[in-house]
Structure formats: C-alpha cells, structure tokens
Amino acid sequence: MQISRLLADIGGTNIRLAWQAVPGGTLNDIRVQPCGDYPTLTAAVQDYLAQVQVPEPREAAFGIANPVTGDAIHMTNHHWSFSQRAVRDALGLQRLVFVNDFTALALALPRLTSEHLRPVGGGEAVAGSAVALIGPGTGLGVSGLVFPPGSEEGVPIAGEGGHVSLAAHTQKEFDVITLLHQRYGHVSAERAVSGAGLVELYHALRQLDGQEGREVSEAAQVTGLAFEQHDALALQALEMFCGFLGSVAGDLALTLGAKGGVYLGGGIVPRLGTWFDQSSFRARFEAKGRFKAYLASIPCWVVDPGGAPALYGAACALDSGRPSA
Ligand SMILES: Nc1ncnc2c1ncn2[C@@H]1O[C@H](COP(=O)(O)OP(=O)(O)OP(=O)(O)O)[C@@H](O)[C@H]1O
C-alpha cells in the first residue's frame, strides 16, 4: 500500500494544501481554500481529503501563521483554536508536525531558484551569511535563516518580528502612527504592513487630509482604487505601505546581518507586480544613515507564491525530524 504525506500552509485568510508521495517528491493536488469556509482546521483538511485521492496519509506537516509554543493553538488572525494532538488523532495521523508558517518558508529558501525570485534593487548575496524573510499577508510574517559552520540547510529563526514597534521616517508617517496609537496603543509593524494595515493606512490618510475618499474594508479595494482608478489617496496609502515595509525589512537586515539577502514573501507584494519595484521600498530599505552602503549591498527578492514554497518548507520541517504533536 502506498503511504503519503500531507502538507498545509495555514494563513489567516487561506489554507493551502498538497500531498507528497515520498520525501522530496513533487507536490500533488495543490489547493487553496478560504479558512472562513470551515468551522475548524480539521474540517478544512477533511474537505481537502474528500476532494482529492490522497493515498493513506500517515504523516503531515502544517505551517501556521501563529507562534507554535505548546499543544494548544489559538490563531491570532483567525478564530480557529485547537489542540495539535486532537487534530492529529481526528485525521488518523501517526505523526503531525506544526511549525510557524514563516519558519517553514525560511526552510524552503535555499531551494528556491531564480525562476521563483524577482530582484528588487541591486546587491550581491554573500554565501554562508544570514538571510532574512519578511512577508505581509493577513499578518506580517518574519523569519530568517542563520548558517552555523557546517550547516548547509540553515537554522530557521522562530520569532514574532511582525510585532516589533513601527517607527516613522516622515512627518506624515508620524501623524499616521499617532492615529494608530490612539486606536490600538502599541503600534506594531503588522498594524500597517499587512492586508488590514493597508486599509488602516488608507483610512488614516483620509482622516488626516480631511478628504472624502471611499469606504474600504479590504486591501484589494485599496489596490483596485490605486491601479484601476488612479485614486490619489489609495496610491498614497500603497506608497506608505511600501515605505514602511522597506523600513522594517531594513531593520531586520541590520539586526540579522542578512548579507545573504532579504526575501519578500506573503501574498500582498507579489500582487503589486512591477509597480512595487518603483515604489519607495528599496530607497527606504537603504535609508539607514551611516549604514546605507551596508544595506545597498544586500539583495532583495520577491518570492513568487506560485511554486507553493511554504508547502515545500513544511515538507522540510517533516524531513528534519521535528517532533510530532
Ligand atoms: N489584490 C490585492 N491587493 C492587496 N491585498 C490583497 C489583495 N488580495 C488579497 N489581499 C490581502 O492579502 C491578505 C492575504 O494574504 P495571503 O494571501 O498571504 O494570505 P494568508 O496566507 O492567509 O496570510 P497570512 O499567512 O499572513 O496569515 C489579506 O489581508 C487580503 O486582504
């Protein structure tokens, strides 16, 4: 009997699933399902299993947009809460590995080829140096890889870098952060650099400028207004989003010493297409005073989500012998 392995990337908006016949094998039946369509994670996975003919999955690895610190998981950006062991048992698995989604994506980075990477700006990667990973989606995922001597795969960083404090670079950004502070108290990077963050920026700019603007509730409406209707306020919000992302990515590169490069993951940046390349992202990435030249030497790449890199990363987590739930 053939035995397979189930892989998932669980975000705040979507769950992507696939299966592999063998370690290192191709990903089969990659599907994206909206989390909101299912009451529980188990129900979402069971629906996938009912749709595709996965031969006897015994092992699984799930990357999830959440810290993974114990058996209980309460998702930050979605209402699913569950026990890892209960999910393992309900799905009849012998082994189920949970890992943070950006830790999983970090594990996949050394395997990405130029086909799945678009450079933004110049710079040359230094082999063996740390690499950084940052990606706005429903939330703001952050990770990276460090390479201790003798390690080719790299060791992923499991932090919560999306929740670092957001700093202003211009008076307008300061005014926007002040408004966000009045609303939320601590203003994390994720409050601006995420799907919900883009909506927040649009509303804050509208309030500051005393403009009418449109009512928006989804990030896609802001990009739609910007790209299809050339709406000035939406373009300003998008520009501020890219500036903040550049600033936070530059801070991350400085902190990690990421001479190996900075990877931009998540679902939003790839949707901005080549417009992103002429945004203020790269200038802001480098705008670190005396460390401008240091950052100018670091390459940045947009990761194409089409190749399902986070699912390959989940497979790497399974291969690396991480403990089961
Ligand atoms: N065209 C668009 N332009 C900008 N943002 C968009 C667009 N379409 C969807 N989004 C936003 O992208 C976000 C979802 O990103 P992504 O596809 O990375 O999902 P996810 O993996 O569930 O997220 P995460 O892993 O951060 O929890 C949502 O906030 C959504 O509003």
Image (cartoon, helix red, strand yellow):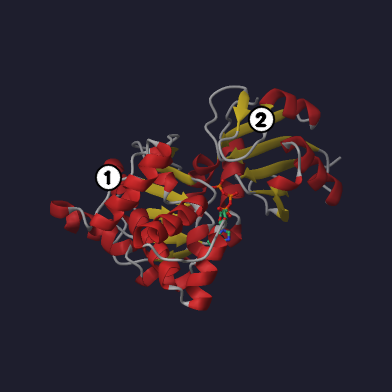
Instruction: Name the foreground residue: 175 vs 98.
Output: 175
State whether residue 302 appears in this view.
yes
Tell me where residue 238 appears, x and y as whole percent: 42, 64
Query: Of the residues under marks 2 and 1, which one precedes in the sequence?
Result: 2
Element type where label 2 sits in the image: strand
Judge left or right: residue 29 versus residue 233: right
Tell me where residue 234 appears, x and y as whole percent: 45, 67
Compared to residue 164, the image places residue 115 above or below, namely below
State whether residue 297 appears in this view.
no
Tell me where residue 323 appears, x and y as whole percent: 60, 25
Q: Quadrant of ligand 1?
A: bottom right
Instruction: Name the foreground residue: 297 vs 128.
Output: 297
Q: Residue at x 77, y 26 (%)?
A: 89
Local packing at callout 1 (Cα closer than 10 Å; few below 14, some 14-19, many 20+) is some
Q: Residue at x 36, y 60 (%)?
A: 240
Marks 2 and 1 sit apart, C-alpha to C-alpha, by 36 Å
Element type where label 1 sits in the image: loop
User: Could you say which quadrant of the image residue 57 lies in?
Assistant: top right
Q: Residues at badges 2 and 1 in contact (C-beta under 8 Å)? A: no
Q: Quadrant of the N terminus?
A: top right
Tell me where residue 199 appears, x and y as whole percent: 49, 56
Compared to residue 41, the image places residue 284 above or below, namely below
Local packing at callout 2 (Cα closer than 10 Å; few below 14, some 14-19, many 20+) is few
Please tell me the numbered disc located at residue 81: 2
The amino acid type of the residue labelled 2 equals Ser
Q: Quadrant of the C terminus?
A: top right
User: What residue does disc 1 label?
Assistant: 257
Q: Among all residues in the image, which is located at the extreme left? A: 290
Instruction: Name the foreground residue: 159 vs 148.
Output: 159
